[in-house]
Amino acid sequence: MAEVIFNKLEKVYSNGFKAVHGIDLKIADGEFMVIVGPSGCAKSTTLRMLAGLETISGGEVRIAPKERGIAMVFQNYALYPHMTVRENLAFGLKLSKMPKDQIDRYVDEAAKILELEELLERLPRQLSGGQAQRVAVGRAIVKKPDVFLFDEPLSNLDAKLRASMRIRISDLHKELKKSGKPATTVYVTHDQTEAMTMGDRICVMKLGHIMQVDTPDNLYHHPKNMFVAGFIGAPEMNIKPGKLIDKAGRLHITIGDESLPLNARQQEKVAAYQNQSVFFGVRPEFVSLSDEPFAEGCCTGEMVRTENMGHEFFVYLKVADYELTARIPSDEAKPMIEKGLNRKVWFKFDMDKCHIFDAKTEQNISL
Ligand code: ADP
């Protein structure tokens, strides 16, 4: 049982650089919270303050109740090179003066969960990257902590191993929860796929500020600002400049020389922005393409590039002075692509899935 609270948490490094700007965050008991953001946004600094590895310059970190056990897994594994896997797993417990038979039991338990049983007598240099990372996770598990901290634990692994470790760590969290001993988890990564697949909630950071804290689904479908909209999702959301104009009593968003009508909800939300420049956002999967005009609400662009992903194509359209990405199922894309590139096609958006952002504040004004 442990709740983690950041209260106006600040970090100013000794050279005067302010890395964390008074952030507030409440992580519930047993919650899996992912902190995600580009390199330099202060994810590690924040986690290290929580772990007690970095001094706090302002505000506070509270772990309630106090004196809860914390265990941290690092990106570089930090295994002791001269100790076997078994000794690495047991080391922290030995320091805490736990009786030997209990240590053996805890180590065997962790080895079983992480499938390390065959590797217990090996030295770290005799392990692959994935195995070493499993030992690093094992070393945290044996402590049976109330709070698990992960600092980019999978960054040194190849894509396939990352995917399987992701599932392993998620499963571990679920199993602990099911067994009635939930571990509150704070997981730092720059990888939005890890964030989306692992987090109960995700905290998106930029330059020492929190941009949004929400469920994966809400971040994806209801991003609060342009930063979150652009950061979450691959390929990235199309975010382009446009203007909101009135046409026959209905607000339209300009797409180059053409325009698309907003839906009723958007009309209402952004009414005050008429005749103003804004940014509109549409994810590539909400762009449809055709060789002929759609019945209504469509624009034209030039198909300039395609990428074959197997089950789908990424199709790049030149529209005005920018490029739009569309994600089209292979069956639909292939016949169009066979007719050749560099020609005019028609496209439309699923307007219900589009976003409009204030050009200055970059806040989503269509939510
Ligand atoms: P992230 O983990 O998101 O990549 P960090 O927490 O490592 O970001 O760093 C956040 C910011 O703080 C960066 O701009 C980084 O250069 C700066 N920083 C990190 N450590 C120090 C330090 N010891 N002294 C001064 N600035 C630092």
Image (tube, rainbow, N blue to C red):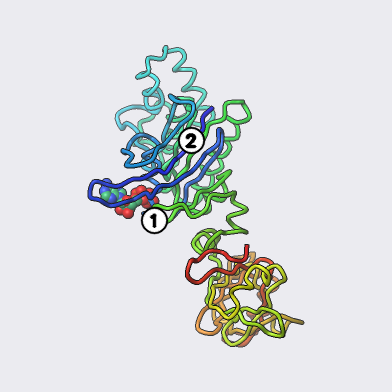
Outermost residue toward the front? 272
Between residue 175 and residue 298, name the one nearer to us: 298
Residue type (three-letter) at the residue carrying disc 1: Leu
Screen quadrant of the C terminus: bottom right
Between residue 88 and residue 279, name the one nearer to us: 279
The reply, left or right, for residue 251 in relation to residue 95 is right
Residue 270 pos. (x, y %): 62, 70
User: Residue 254, relative to residue 314: is it above or below?
Assistant: below
* Res 310 → quadrant: bottom right
Residue 227 visible in this rendered orientation of the protein: yes
The residue labelled by disc 1 is: 207
For the point 52% across and 23% down, the residue is 109
Residue type (three-letter) at the residue carrying disc 2: Val
For the point 37% across and 49% down, the residue is 20
Q: Which mark is residue 330?
A: none
The residue labelled by disc 2 is: 4
Q: Mark 1 or 2 closer to N-term?
A: 2
Residue 230 pos. (x, y %): 51, 63
**For disc 1, does the CB lie below 8 Å from ligand 1?**
yes
